[in-house]
């Protein structure tokens, strides 16, 4: 190579050495051996030389090009090695550190409560029914003696989906699990069609429900458990016995009093709110509302496909979230749904 080509190779090596990133290195490459680079320009000038000079000059340019390419590849490898080393340092693993334990999981406290409710009522002969969380207007309201524009709807018909049902009214996110009482009873009637006497209906319907409500004791999504017992001679006395036995079993204490306060629900008549009072402990002496109840309204019995002249009984609805708060001494419902492992770990 002559002095001009030696200088060109030296300049290329300096430019490559100064490139701190692969992108900068590619920019430097373009200046020397790219399509518009210095070597390409020199090769284009060979056409003006005599054949003998062209041969010598071409060999010298090719030698310079090889030297530049070697310098380029060497710098590429150096940058790649440096990047790998930095990555390894960043991902270094200290094998002397203690291992990460995979802790055993556990059921959510509300799930524990639902399981407990189902077990207690199963021991009393109740079935467990499960059904859709997206319901028709008829099942959510009208079948429960709660027709359109009824004032009792104001706090319940709150979440709808953008799909109309067969009645032209949009489907809703169920505000209670009462629709499952109607669905279960209708299926029960169909199953035993033709029989002279229809077996009694005993069922609970636990599940998620939805209403526009959110504070320390309410959530837009919450859990509810409805209960239904229908037969020919099911009375309010049976309701009191069943629910008293349930509460004392659930809270594992007989030191517990119940109070039934007159109330109003469209689907029961007469209706009552159920309060409990602990006789000892941190909640002693306070009446705490835990459920609504009543004798099933004749219109609802008729919508179930039954004869209200022959079939009577009671229904109740309670909040498993509220029962969970009372059982475990939790004062803010939102803690159950925030997903804080520190809180949930206590119930494993």
Image (cartoon, rainbow, N blue to C red):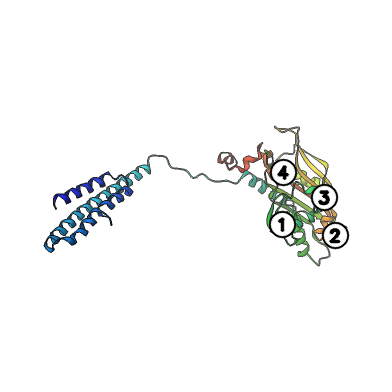
Dot in front, 2 or 4: 2
Categorize mark 3 by other alpha carbons within 10 Å: few (<14), some (14-19), many (20+): many
Q: State the CA–CA distance, disc 2 to disc 3.
A: 16 Å
Categorize mark 1 by other alpha carbons within 10 Å: few (<14), some (14-19), many (20+): some
Question: Which residue is disc 3 drawn over?
Answer: 268
Residue 170: image tag: 1
Residue 307: image tag: 2
Question: Visible in this render: residue 45?
Answer: yes
Image point (81%, 41%), residue name: 260
Dot in front, 3 or 1: 1
Image point (17%, 61%), residue name: 48
CB under 8 Å between callouts 2 and 4?
no
Disc 4 or 3, which lies upstream in sequence?
4
Q: Position of residue 51 (x, y in %)?
A: 13, 64
Disc 2 or 4, which lies upstream in sequence?
4
Tag 3, which secondary structure?
A: strand
CB under 8 Å between callouts 4 and 3?
no
Dot in front, 1 or 2: 1
Q: State the CA–CA distance, disc 1 to disc 2.
A: 30 Å
């Amino acid at each position: 190579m002559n002095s001009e080509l030696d200088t060109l190779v030296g300049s290329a090596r300096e430019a490559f050495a100064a490139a701190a990133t692969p992108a900068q290195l590619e920019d430097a490459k373009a200046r020397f051996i790219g399509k518009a680079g210095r070597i390409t320009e020199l090769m284009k000038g060979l056409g003006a030389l005599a054949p003998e000079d062209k041969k010598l000059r071409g060999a010298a340019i090719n030698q310079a090009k090889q030297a530049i390419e070697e310098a380029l590849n060497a710098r590429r490898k150096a940058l790649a090695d440096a990047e790998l080393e930095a990555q390894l340092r960043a991902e270094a693993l200290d094998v002397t550190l203690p291992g990460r334990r995979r802790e055993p999981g556990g059921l959510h406290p509300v799930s524990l409560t639902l399981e407990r409710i189902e077990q207690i009522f199963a021991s009393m002969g109740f079935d467990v029914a499960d059904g859709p969380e997206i319901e028709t207007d008829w099942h959510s309201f009208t079948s429960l003696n709660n027709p359109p524009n009824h004032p009792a709807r104001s706090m319940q018909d709150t979440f709808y989906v953008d799909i109309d049902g067969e009645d032209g009214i949009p489907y809703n996110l169920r505000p209670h699990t009462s629709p499952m009482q109607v669905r279960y009873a209708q299926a029960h009637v169909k199953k035993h069609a033709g029989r002279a006497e229809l077996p009694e209906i005993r069922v609970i319907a636990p599940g998620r429900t939805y209403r526009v409500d959110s504070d320390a004791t309410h959530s837009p999504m919450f859990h509810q458990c409805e209960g239904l017992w229908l037969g020919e001679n099911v009375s309010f006395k049976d309701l009191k016995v069943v629910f008293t036995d349930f509460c004392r079993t659930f809270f594992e204490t007989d030191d517990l009093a119940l109070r039934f306060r007159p109330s109003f629900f469209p689907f029961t008549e007469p209706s009552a709110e159920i309060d409990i009072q602990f006789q000892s402990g941190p909640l002693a002496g306070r009446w705490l509302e835990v459920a609504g109840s009543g004798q099933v309204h004749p219109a609802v019995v008729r919508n179930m496909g039954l004869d209200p002249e022959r079939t009577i009984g009671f229904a109740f609805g309670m909040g498993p979230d509220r029962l969970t708060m009372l059982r475990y001494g939790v004062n803010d419902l939102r803690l159950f749904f925030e997903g804080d492992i520190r809180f949930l770990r206590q119930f494993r």
